[in-house]
Amino acid sequence: MSTPVPNLGAPHPGATSELALGDGLVAETSGGAAAAAAPAAKRKKRGYGISFWLATAWLVVVLICAVFADLLPVKDPLTPDVINKLAYPGPEHWLGTDGLGRDNLARLVHGARVSVTISVTAVAIGMVVGGFIGIVAGFFRGKLETVLMTIINVILAFPALVLLLVLLAFVGRSLVVISLIVGFLSIPIYTRVARATTLAVAEREFVRAARTMGAKNSRVLAREILPNVVLPVAAFGLVAMGVVIVLEGTLAFLGLSVQQPAPTWGGMIFDGKRYLSEAPHVVLIPSIAMFLTVLSLNLVGDSLRSRFDVRGSNL
């Protein structure tokens, strides 16, 4: 009786299904990885978007108006036209006139100078001074951090608007004074943002590697910490500029901004509120300009923050 010879080249009865199942798993895994990689690549290649560029264009227009207000072909913002008081937008006055017959477009253009000057100066002071204090406190830690953050917390304990009004009452209401006071009051906010960012960056692998290689603290701060802290703080500064513009408008509405008859957006809203029923455009025009400026700053700041945010996956 002959013994059947086993077919060594044939697969095991269950091998085919296991092999097929394995191939299916590999194919499914590869397909899932490819499907996950496709949106990631799309997100990486995605640009800023139309909203970012529209917001940037509006901010450029506001900046041009603030810098070149005296050179632009607009009327004198202080010259009244008594005959055309509260005139609606037309060919002679593109954005109408206010209660004294002054051209709204000219006042809007020259008012941008006050808002831009105060916001830029205040944010610059807060970023430089507050950012420096925050980086030092977050990097060196210990008793130095305790002392610095105690001072910052004491300043934050005072109501900002009340403290601002008190300082304005004693010092004055010039453009320089308001810019310096608002900049001083914004230092604690930037200190906390810079400190929090520094604490996160200081634990990254490249900072530890630099310290392991014997780099001095000054070199680590300048080469590793500062470049990764500046961008988030600058993106926050753009958003904070919108807050400062609203704050200046609030002061002007209360009659506590720069002296009259210098045009400001908040002052235009304050002067036009008495004519709200018969000429609402006097209030709406500066309100819309302020709204678009604050919205644009928020859109640009958020876009830059998300684009330049340094994440651990990128190391």
Image (cartoon, grey):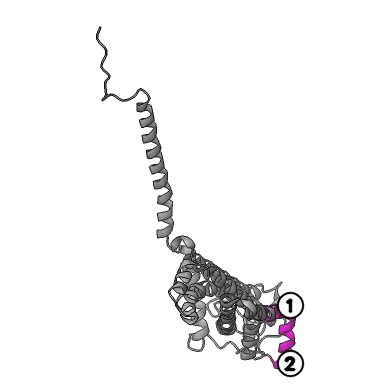
Residue behind mark 2: 170
Image check: 154 left or right of 68? right
Residue 134, given in percent of the width and then of the height, sits at 59, 78
User: Residue at 36% across / 27% down in the picture?
Assistant: 15
User: Residue at 56% across / 80% down in the picture?
Assistant: 93
Magenta stretch secondary structure, dominant: helix
The residue lying furthest to the top in this view is 1
Image check: 4 left or right of 118? left
Mark 2 residue type: Phe
Mark 1 residue type: Ala
Image check: 32 left or right of 134? left
Tell me the distance, in whole angstroms, between the alpha carbons under discs 2 and 1.
Answer: 21 Å
Per the rendering, the mark at residue 157 is 1
Q: Earlier in the sequence, mark 2 or mark 1?
A: 1
Q: Nearer the viewer, residue 312 or 232?
A: 312
Per the rendering, the mark at residue 188 is none
Residue 183, given in percent of the width and then of the height, sits at 62, 83
> Considering only vertical position in the picture, is 31 above or below 231?
above
Give the SS element for disc 2: helix
Q: Nearer the viewer, residue 272 or 294?
A: 294
User: Residues in magenta?
Assistant: 151-172
Instruction: Rate crowding at label 2 as few (under 14), some (14 to 19) or many (20 or more) other CA atoms within 10 Å.
Output: few
Image check: 108 left or right of 160? left
Q: Can residue 201 be seen from the camera position used here?
A: yes
Instruction: Rate crowding at label 1 as few (under 14), some (14 to 19) or many (20 or more) other CA atoms within 10 Å.
Output: few
User: Residue at 45% across / 64% down in the picture?
Assistant: 48
The reply to whether the magenta stretch includes residue 258 is: no
Q: Can residue 87 be seen from the camera position used here?
A: no
